[in-house]
Amino acid sequence: MLSDKGSSARMHVQVNMQSLFFIALFRRQTRDVVLKWVERVLPARIPFLPLRNPPARAMNLFITGHIQAFQDGVAKRAAARAADHRYVAGPATPDNDAEPLIT
């Protein structure tokens, strides 16, 4: 029984640390700090890995590109939902005229 509780606690810590990591990457301020640290730690070149940029810069471009793509997708879905008039604030009345919830 004790090992199950320890395993469960480790799992919760791991999930929380992963969540913290991804939240930190989504915030530009903390992402810049983390990537600057990675830039100091990684070498300028890795012989067996042909990259156009230094590894830290390649990682920065990769992460930033994926975050931008995610944010663009969120904005696109929000715009599509705002344009869908099935999502309304309530029944049409002379006061609200069934305005969409998201504008």
Image: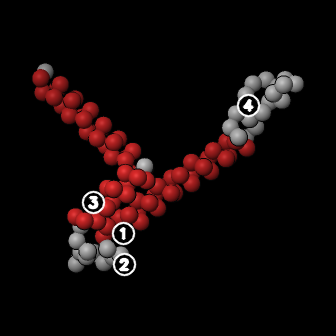
The amino acid on which the numbered mark 4 sits, given as a three-letter code, is: Val
**Of callouts 3 and 4, which one flags the residue occurring earlier in the amino acid sequence?**
3
The kind of secondary structure element at disc 1 is: helix
In percent of width and height, residue 19 lies at: 35, 41
The amino acid on which the numbered mark 2 sits, given as a three-letter code, is: Arg
- Residue 14 is marked as none
Q: How is the image coloured?
A: secondary structure
**Of callouts 3 and 2, which one flags the residue occurring earlier in the amino acid sequence?**
3
- At x 60%, y 49%, the residue is 75
Q: Is residue 46 above or below residue 93?
A: below
Q: Which residue is mark 4?
A: 88
Between the C-alphas of marks 3 and 4, the distance is 47 Å
Q: Are marks 3 and 4 in contact (CB under 8 Å)?
A: no
Q: Nearer the viewer, mark 3 or mark 4?
A: 3
Q: Which residue is mark 2?
A: 52
The kind of secondary structure element at disc 2 is: loop
Between the C-alphas of marks 2 and 1, the distance is 8 Å
The amino acid on which the numbered mark 1 sits, given as a three-letter code, is: Ala
- Crowd class of label 4 (few under 14; some 14 to 19; many from 20; radius 10 Å): some
Q: Are marks 2 and 1 in contact (CB under 8 Å)?
A: yes
Q: Which residue is mark 1?
A: 58
**Of callouts 2 and 1, which one flags the residue occurring earlier in the amino acid sequence?**
2
Horizontal relation, residue 32 to residue 101: left or right: left
The kind of secondary structure element at disc 4 is: loop
- At x 79%, y 23%, the residue is 91
Q: Which residue is mark 3?
A: 37
Q: Is residue 92 above or below residue 66?
A: above
